[in-house]
Image (spheres, rainbow, N blue to C red):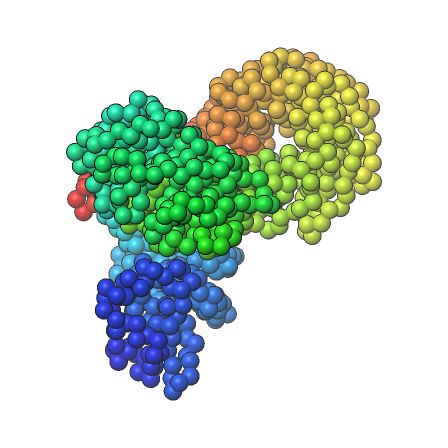
Amino acid sequence: MLNPISSLANLPYSTAQKSNQSSFSALPLEVREEIENQLDFSNRQALFEALTTVTRDGDLIDSPALKLHLIKEWIRTEYQRDLICSDEGFKQFALRQLQNLLEAKQLEQVVEKARLFELVCLVNDPNIFTFLREQVHQDAQLKEKLLNWVERSKTEEVQAIAANALTLLVKAGVSLSHKDLKGIRVPGADLSYGIFDSAQLQSSDLRGANLSGSWLRQVDLSGAKMEGVRFGEGPYLQEESEVNSCACSPDGKACAVGLKNGTINIYNTSSWEKICTLQGHTGNVLSLAYSPSGHQIASGGDDQAVRLWDAYSGKLSHTLTEHEDDVSSVVYSPDGHQIAAGGSNWGVQVWDAHSGEPSDTLYLEAGKVISVAYSPDGYQIATGSAGGDVQLWDVRSEELEHTLIDEEEYVGDVTSVVYSPSGRQIASGSDDGSVRLWDRHSGELQRVLLRHDGRVLSVAYSPNGRQIVSGGADKTVRLWDVDSGKSQTIREHTGFVSSVAYLSNGRQIVSASGDNTVRLWDAYSGETSHTSEGRVMAVTSVAYSPSGHQIASGSQDTTIRLWDAHSGQTNYILKGHLGVLASVVYSPSGQQIASGGDATVRLWNVDSGEVDQCLKGHVGMVTSVVYSPSGQQLASGSGDKTVRLWNVGSGKVEQILKGHVNNVTSVAYSPSGQQIASGSLDKTVRLWDADSGEAIHSLQGHTKPVRSVTYSPGGYQIASGSDDHTVRLWDVRSGKAVHILEGHTGWVKNVVYTSSGQQIVSSSDDQTVRLWSASLGQCLTVLRGFDGPIHGLAWKEMADSVHLSTTSNREVVRVWQVSEKEGRYQASLSWSSMRVKLTLTDANIQDARGLSQMNKQLLQQRGAVGEANRFA
């Protein structure tokens, strides 16, 4: 519905005239609402265009500034973002204005220009934020000017400008870890995905701020004003068994969840307090649906029954038992008079919702039915089947109208089907990890959304039809923009996501999981990420350049990315490998990178990003590469059980070292370059003469495969990490174990010495990094806060700081600053290549004011400490 359109006589553009098309505004309010509800996005966009078209003496005025004013004046707030985001003219206008400010050396003034800054945030264009990010990191003065506005907010009435400045710093990826931000006043700031490790925010004014996905470990929020703060999610519900279905009431005030143990719990969505429990199913509750009136709930289970419940009293009204197998899907007709149930009995049974009597049956031609959906007009039923088809049935004639098939791609079972609110589109989720969008009338496949790394279990449209949410076996919830296909991924569940649903306001999403939890999310807490479609791949290796200014990472997606070590900006993406990359390393000069993966070693020119040489000879995947200290030789280990020594200049093999009886996983040169160590799946570490290739020692003691080997800076000691959860320290001369370092509870993937050689750093599948004394073999500290197994580890000590770089199985490269005080070590996040999740471990919320009960519960679940004051 549109707001009443104000007269242009009240606007500062007195010569502008409304287009005749804007007579739509003269229609009665209820008529406008009805028309708008029937429009799909493209038609709604055309309507907006007509409403915001102005002329002067009959000539169109193409003024983005004027158009923005008219949109803000005429268009309902909930539609403004969609319209502005989709308008290329706005994006070009915003970028042009920023470039003009930069040329005038006044870019910092963008935070003072309220309407321009608002436009920048609303268009949310990646090119704009890339531009701003580059300027902030290149211009130290710009960064200081922005920080100065934030500082001034403590004592001056500049809250709006300070909020814009802090928003821009966060959007530019500036880490605010350890910053003294006590008493800042930045109400309404968008601080989503900001990094605030150990920041001091005592007595700050954060009212209405967006802190979705922020990194707030050990931040001090004591006494802060936090009324209306958004964290992008609500507290989770802990159930007693797996949650396999959920449904929200039409008014959005209640949520029903079905459990594996046969129980259905109903919650108040404003407080997450339990309203009642429905008991009657004798097995897993597989599907739930509210009637359109909200007065009744239908449930289907693996006890072969559909049960109808009074939504208010919780009493069982009917038990429908004519199904022959699991009832995997139940849905009400739009008028609420009928219920369609599908399952493993090769058909769809339609029931009368009031009497509980069967009214009709649709028999499908093939495959068991997994999902059923009614079209919004009630004239059609869509079914998803085990055969990979989506079938559309005419309800009145009971005839099959369309079979929707993707002829070019493997689909697998269709696990979920749903109509868009307009009824013109159908979304289907399937075994191949995809969500497919179909035209209901033509049956044409419009788009394939492919990001889930496993089976899609549930799909739902937002009430406005602009967004889709999907849940999958890969434990993720994904939000999709229907028009662009861009996605955002939520990774919080630790079990499969079995069911997802929108609340009626469209602003919140509920997800149910096999991890026994139900979680509540903000559908617009963070903007969709601008990443290309494809599977989520692990980042397997990471290395610092000798100067410490650049980082290289290798990934399962076959690419190498070069990052600015300070800002996190991607400088190059190197492509050429045909398979998974397992290892990357810089040459001692820093001018070349070696990478190993698909049975080849490739040497890359760092400046041009071109391949200098491709070294071929291994007959198995190359798992590890390392340069000799002189840079003239390179060693590579492989799945073919050998280590090969290459002449870097000629690219020829000089030695092939044989002796391991299983895959070689890691190779390292001694500091003198005279010796090589190799680790293997055969549980041994072998030492070789680098000149002759002769075996010197076989170090035995690990009880499981060795994953990593490295020499101490002095060359007298070797550290090795293993799947047996230990790090072993070996004397190079004798080949005997000096220490066995125990403490990790998962595979030890990486080990590295600090530059002094007095300490060893190790990373593990147990999601920790440990720092050890090399001489005593004692653990000095455990660094936590990682959200997955650590595949790659690099340690870099510079004049004024120590940095740690880690990689994970979620496409993430992260850089941490390591600090030591009185013998205690701490790692603070500097930047992350992908958005971090909301992290509040040990955040202090003592006497924080204005937190809602829901937010207080959320913070406590996430590890915050202290007792907040609910009153502002």
Q: Is residue 450 left or right of residue 593?
A: left
Query: Residue 764, position in %: x, y?
Result: 52, 26
Q: Which of the pair 872/304 is nearer the observer?
A: 304
Query: Residue 752, position in %: x, y?
Result: 59, 29
Q: Which of the pair 25/76 is nearer the observer?
A: 25
> Is residue 321 shown to the viewer in this render?
yes
Among the 4 quarters of the image, the one containing residue 68 = bottom left
Among the 4 quarters of the image, the one containing residue 634 = top right
Q: Is residue 778 left or right of residue 234?
A: right
Query: Residue 480, position in %: x, y?
Result: 44, 48
Q: Quadrant of the N terminus?
A: bottom left
Q: Is residue 504 above or below residue 514?
A: below
Residue that lies at the very extreme toward the front in this rendered image: 397
* Residue occupying the point 48% across, 48% down: 402
* Residue occupying the point 27% across, 48% down: 335
Among the 4 quarters of the image, the one containing residue 43 = bottom left
> Is residue 255 shown to the viewer in this render?
no
Query: Residue 716, position in %: x, y?
Result: 66, 21
Q: Is residue 226 left or right of residue 347?
A: left
Q: Is residue 568 above or below residue 739?
A: below
Q: Which of the pair 710/246 is nearer the observer?
A: 246
* Residue occupying the point 32% across, 74% down: 22
* Residue occupying the point 42% across, 83% down: 59
Q: Is residue 10 left or right of residue 750?
A: left
